[in-house]
Every structure is written in structure tokens, then in C-alpha cells.
């Protein structure tokens, strides 16, 4: 799944708020029959920038 959660011009707190809303939506969409870890990896990047891997266990 790919999503835009903000722009470089956004304040850090707004980016965090947008990410939390996106993450909650993904978790709510998890089918009841799905077992195990639903999100296994997460990378944040700008349009053409280098990706930064995020530890999904820290979320």
C-alpha cells in the first residue's frame, strides 16, 4: 500500500497525526481471518528520495 501523508512543508506534528490516522485505517481494514503481523515493513520516502526504513515493532 502506498499513501501520501504530507508534504515537506508540513509541520512535524501534522505529519505524525496524518500517519497515525493512516495506520489506524490500515489496522481497521485487517480482515478478522488474517492472522499474524499485518504490517511487516514500512519505508518513508520523498517522491524521488532515498527510503528510510521504520521499525514496525516501535509503532
Image (cartoon, rainbow, N blue to C red):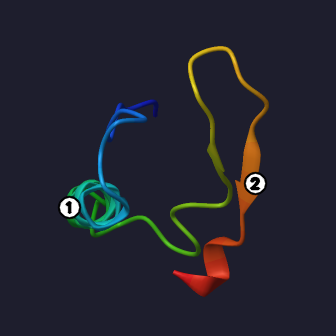
Q: Is 28 left, or right, of 34 in this rendering?
A: left
**Going from the N terminus, do you reach mark 1 or mark 2 first?**
1
Residue 39: numbered disc? none
**Of 55 and 5, which appears nearest the observer?**
5
* Location of residue 9 by image quarter: top left
Residue sitting at 27 percent across and 69 percent down?
32
**Mark 1 Cα shell of 10 Å, populated few (<14), some (14-19), many (≥20):** few
Q: Are marks 1 and 2 in contact (CB under 8 Å)?
A: no
- As helix, strand or loop, the secondary structure at mark 1 comes to helix
* Location of residue 40 by image quarter: bottom right
Q: How many marks?
A: 2
User: Is 58 situated above or below 37?
Assistant: below
**Of 12 and 39, which appears nearest the observer?**
12
User: Is 33 situated above or below 57?
Assistant: above
> What residue would you read off at disc 1?
21
Q: Is 23 left, or right, of 24 in this rendering?
A: right
* Location of residue 8 by image quarter: top left
- The picture places residue 10, in percent across and down from the top left corner, at 30, 44
**Of 58 and 35, which appears nearest the observer?**
58
Q: Is 50 left, or right, of 29 in this rendering?
A: right
- As helix, strand or loop, the secondary structure at mark 2 comes to strand
- The picture places residue 25, in percent across and down from the top left corner, at 21, 57
> What residue would you read off at disc 2?
53
Residue sitting at 36 percent across and 33 percent down?
7
| The furthest residue to the top | 48
**Mark 2 Cα shell of 10 Å, populated few (<14), some (14-19), many (≥20):** few
| Separation of residues labelled 1 and 2 (CA atoms) | 19 Å
Residue sitting at 58 percent across and 72 percent down?
37
- The picture places residue 17, in percent across and down from the top left corner, at 23, 65
Residue sitting at 30 percent across and 55 percent down?
11
Amino acid at each position: 500500500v502506498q499513501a501520501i501523508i504530507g508534504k515537506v512543508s508540513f509541520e512535524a506534528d501534522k505529519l505524525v497525526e496524518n500517519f497515525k490516522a493512516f495506520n489506524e485505517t490500515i489496522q481497521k481494514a485487517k480482515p478478522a481471518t488474517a492472522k499474524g503481523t499485518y504490517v511487516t515493513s514500512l519505508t518513508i520516502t520523498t517522491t524521488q528520495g532515498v527510503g528510510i526504513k521504520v521499525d514496525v515493532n516501535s509503532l
